[in-house]
Image: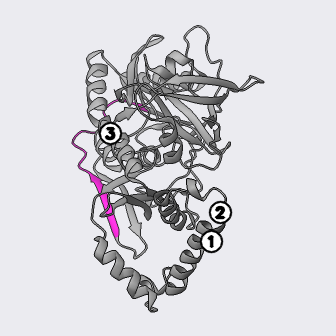
Amino acid sequence: MLIISLFFACVCTGGALYRLYKARAVGVSAQGGRESVVTNDTLEKMKVIEDAVSTYYYYEDKVDAEEMREGIYKGMIDSLGDPYSEYYSKEELEEAINSNQGISYGIGAYISMSKQMNMAMINGVMEGSPAEEAGLREGDIIYEVDGETTQGMSLTQVVSLVKGREGTTVQLTIYREGEVDFQRLEIKRSKRLETTTVDSGMLEDADNIGYLRIREFDTVTVDQYTEAMAELRGHGMEGMILDLRSNPGGDVNAVVEIARKILPEGLIVYTEDKQGVRKEYTCDGKKELDVPLVVLVNEYSASASEILAGAIQDYHKGTLVGTTTYGKGIVQQIQRLDDGTALKLTISAYYTPAGRNIHGVGIKPDVELEYDYEGNEETGSDNQVERAIEILNDEISVENN
């Protein structure tokens, strides 16, 4: 899930778009002095290719003109070589909006991209969902969706393949660590699902410590976080574990609002665009967290989750435990076109309060600890949670004394 600021501006009308083509066709350079792409030669070559397909292509009767046009638009953005910039069809745009609002149509699974495998992976499974019933597990690598490999795909492309009409089925080919053979799961798509992005509760083996996991940052996350915190405080929470492991990011406004419920007064994050224009997100400190905090991170903690983790680390507001984060320090913005399609483009880089840009580098935790799947058999906690409990108990003990 990437940092997306939904900016629904009409970029140009159909007529304006045509005039733009005509202007560039007679040699007007692109904005900023870059060589123009859409020229008379380009348009002429496109026409030559179309004529060749019509004349020679054996399966010409199966050619879909709209798909071919969509392919041209997608190709322009793909040529940027930026995995975070995309062209959205009308359907893909609707899915992006729904996802950002915490609404899901499909199998009830959270999907992110595995940096190591360059494939999609399951980041979590909703309780009672078709994905859970089919046996899908967190950490599963999605090798194929209906026979199409996810290697090299964008997150949007994978999600659009997995989701579909209620009652239809999708086949996922899954690789599970520790198993030799691939699994093929046939999953029936469900009706509209409301996404739960926050899980929380008091730990059984440390009943004064609250545990709160944020799976992704959507518009629904802030309310879910607020409700969860109220419950934890009602149970006498004296220390808190904030689990951002495998959180792929999401809505920048959502993560900023949550940061305002944790951090002291000051800067949360700032962005700079290619002109050097700076935008700051700040906190008044009136809702600063008043209990010791440990934040769990891993190599799949990305984007918005790195904004929060980086700010907490810069202010020494909590201890980061785990492994170095993903390293996505750039921001995308969706710009809607007049025909209902859209562009998602990288528009700026973001920096932590201390001025760190972590793109391609990630955030190194204060306590580096590789994940141990087995964990503690008696408590059911993994080793990173156990280390977090130790740190919090020490801090709580110091405060009480």
Asked which quadrant contains residue 242, the reply is: top left
Residue closest to the eye, 212 or 288 = 212
Picture coordinates of residue 5 (x, y %)? 34, 54
326 and 291: which one is in front? Answer: 326
Which segment did they paint magenta?
278-293
At mark 2, the secondary structure is: loop
Task: Name the residue at 55% across, 21% down.
Answer: 386
380 up-or-down from 45: above or below: above
Secondary element under disc 3, as helix, strand or loop, is loop
Task: State left or right for residue 185 relative to residue 307.
Answer: right
| Lower position in the chain sequence, tag 1 or tag 3 | 1
Check contact, mark 1 vs mark 2: CB within 8 A.
Answer: yes
Number of the front mark, 1 or 3: 1
The residue singled out by tag 3 in the image is 262
Instruction: Give the residue pinned by disc 1.
Output: 52
Amino acid type for the residue under numbered disc 1: Ala
Whether pointer 3 and pointer 2 mark residues with C-beta atoms closer than 8 Å, the reply is: no
Three-letter amino acid code of the residue under disc 3: Ile
As drawn, the label of residue 181 is none
| For marks 3 and 2 on the same chain, the one whose residue lies earlier in the sequence | 2
- Residue 166: image location, x then y, percent: 40, 28
Front residue (pair 21, 182)? 21
* Callout 1 secondary element: helix
Name the one closer to the observer, 255 or 294: 255
The residue tagged 2 is 57
